[in-house]
Amino acid sequence: MSQIVSLQTARVRSAEHLQPGSGTEHWMRRELERSDPEQWVFDAIAGLPHEDFALACWSQQPNLRKAAVKLASYITPRWPTEDGSSLLAHSIGEAVKRAKAAVDNGEVFTGRFVGVYLYGLTLHARDVARLSIKGVDRFGVLEHWRPFSEPLQPWASRLGVDTLIAETVAPGPTEATVEGIRSHMIVRVSDPIDTGYLLKHAAQG
């Protein structure tokens, strides 16, 4: 469920009333609605060094593609890493790179292969924890998105949030916060069997 924050009981009537701070971006919901998580995932791997390997992985293990699509539904292509690049592309690239390394090392059994892929896909939880997402709903109430509580674009649509405001958290997230968010990531993007593979065969990468 979303957290509703009322500032001194006053209702904020539009996103323009919010004062952007440093490290603030505005994402328009209508732009996110022009595509979907499936397409975001394929766009994210386009041109990557291991694009062909990723497509082969997803053909043989559709669950791994589904995990990437689920991640995309939560962070969208707009979520940045610390250097400003797409976190979605970075996370998928990390997952595919680690899966390929496992194959190259002869670690081809399913548990290890799936585990290292999911480890890479959820490795950059700190980049998720770096941002807070909020927006003004259809009633003028300021809403805060709780990480991995529900997919981001449907959350905005449900509440009538037209502009998502992404702000860098200051000070930065604690290790406990990062670990908590990563745990939520794993639960949200993976099924119980694949989560078991991650914990048993790739807990440390």
Image: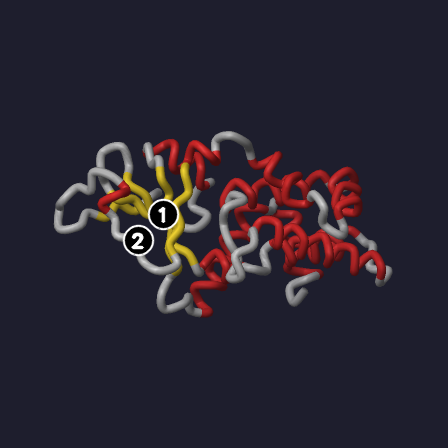
Q: Are marks 2 and 1 in contact (CB under 8 Å)?
A: yes
SS at badge 2: loop
**In this image, 118 relative to 137: left or right?**
right
**Label drawn at residue 20:** 2
Mark in front: 2 vs 1? 2
**In this image, 110 relative to 10: left or right?**
right
SS at badge 1: strand
Q: Quadrant of residue 174?
A: bottom left
- Classify mark 2: residues with Cα within 10 Å, few (<14), some (14-19) or many (20+): some
Visible in this render: residue 183?
yes
Q: How many marks?
A: 2
| Quadrant (top left/top right/bottom left/bottom right) for the N terminus | top left
Display coloring: secondary structure
Q: Quadrant of residue 2?
A: top left
Residue 135: % across, % down: 32, 43
Q: Is residue 84 above or below residue 32?
A: below
**Three-letter amino acid code of the residue under disc 1:** Ile
Residue ID at (45%, 59%):
129
Closest to the observer, 115 or 28 = 28
Visible in this render: residue 146?
no
| Quadrant (top left/top right/bottom left/bottom right) for the C terminus | bottom right
Residue 152: % across, % down: 44, 41
Residue 84: % across, % down: 52, 57
Residue ID at (31%, 58%):
21
**Label drawn at residue 30:** none
Residue ID at (49%, 50%):
79
Q: Is residue 98 above or below residue 149?
A: below
**Three-letter amino acid code of the residue under disc 2:** Pro
* Residue reaching furthest to the left: 9
- Classify mark 1: residues with Cα within 10 Å, few (<14), some (14-19) or many (20+): many
**Residue labelled with disc 1:** 165
